[in-house]
Image (tube, rainbow, N blue to C red):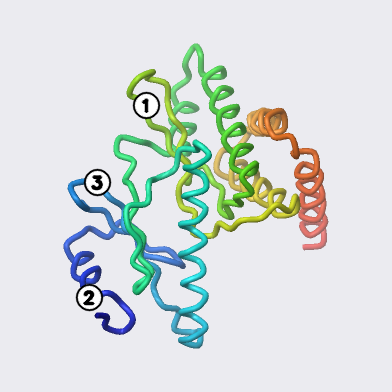
Amino acid sequence: MAVDGRSVATQQFLKKTDQIKQGAEARVYRGIFLGKPTIFKERFPKLYRHPLLDEKLTHRRTVQEVRSLLRCRKAGISVPAVYFVDHSCHCIFLEDIVGSITVREYIASTQLTPQKNQEESLDQLAKKIGLVLAKMHEEDVVHGDLTTSNMLLKAGVETGEADLFLIDFGLSYISALPEDKGVDMYVLEKAFLSTHPNTEALFDKLLKAYASSYRKSHGVINKLNEVRLRGRKRSMVG
């Protein structure tokens, strides 16, 4: 049973949760599902689109997001578990990574409070990010919105070493094309350097770790350089 294309059960459930964010594509809530801390991501209708086209596109986006998450988990990449998907309202129930902080927060706090091993700590983080992204691209998953806000760090239970989680696969898709992966890395580079000024050397270390771990990285790096060049040309024209 559904009202206006939305599951009544899910609709009622979301009323009992806390909305924590609303973006261009979805509303995000936090609550408990089956006794577990859960993030609920609900894609809402775009009124400027024809209803049938909107339904088709939104359904596709939801399927692509879930497919990317499942493919990453199968490959051993740390991403939130998918608990449930309600396709009638395009809502995904995801594991809430409790006790984590964003990579953006970690880098900012580390830069503000100089430590003896600050450079080494950030270098290790850059390497970890590069290796995880190499593994993701090895699985032909293109994230589509790589930023340091969409990466979480959480201390491992057994080792105490921080695990790196990738989140927010709302724009993700499956592609083996070097062009798509190159754009993925370009998006990260732009976001990384604009959010964390004077970290060009750090991003270079991230890219070096990516290249050393991904056997098809040569084509991706070439495409990344092509996109960089086009970006510089547009900036000069502008």
Q: Position of residue 180 (x, y in %)?
A: 70, 54
SS assignment at label 3: strand
Q: Position of residue 167 (x, y in %)?
A: 45, 47
Looking at this view, is 229 or 74 the one in front?
74
Q: Earlier in the sequence, mark 3 or mark 2?
A: 2
- Disc 2 to disc 1: CB gap under 8 Å: no
Residue at x 22% of width, y 75% of height: 8
Is residue 135 rendered to the left or right of residue 11?
right
SS assignment at label 2: helix
Type of residue at label 2?
A: Val
Instruction: Give the number of the disc on residue 155.
Output: 1
Type of residue at label 1?
A: Ala
Q: Position of residue 146 (x, y in %)?
A: 56, 48
For disc 3, the marked residue is: 37
Residue at x 30% of width, y 56% of height: 20
Please rate how many residues cluster around mark 3, counting C-alpha atoms within 10 Å: few if below 14, some from 14 to 19, many from 20.
some
Looking at this view, is 1 or 169 the one in front?
1
Q: Nearer the viewer, mark 3 or mark 2?
A: 2
Kindly report the distance in space between the C-alpha atoms of the residues bearing marks 3 and 2: 22 Å
Residue at x 63% of width, y 29% of height: 202
Quadrant of the image occupied by residue 100: top left
Q: Residue furthest front?
A: 74
For disc 2, the marked residue is: 8
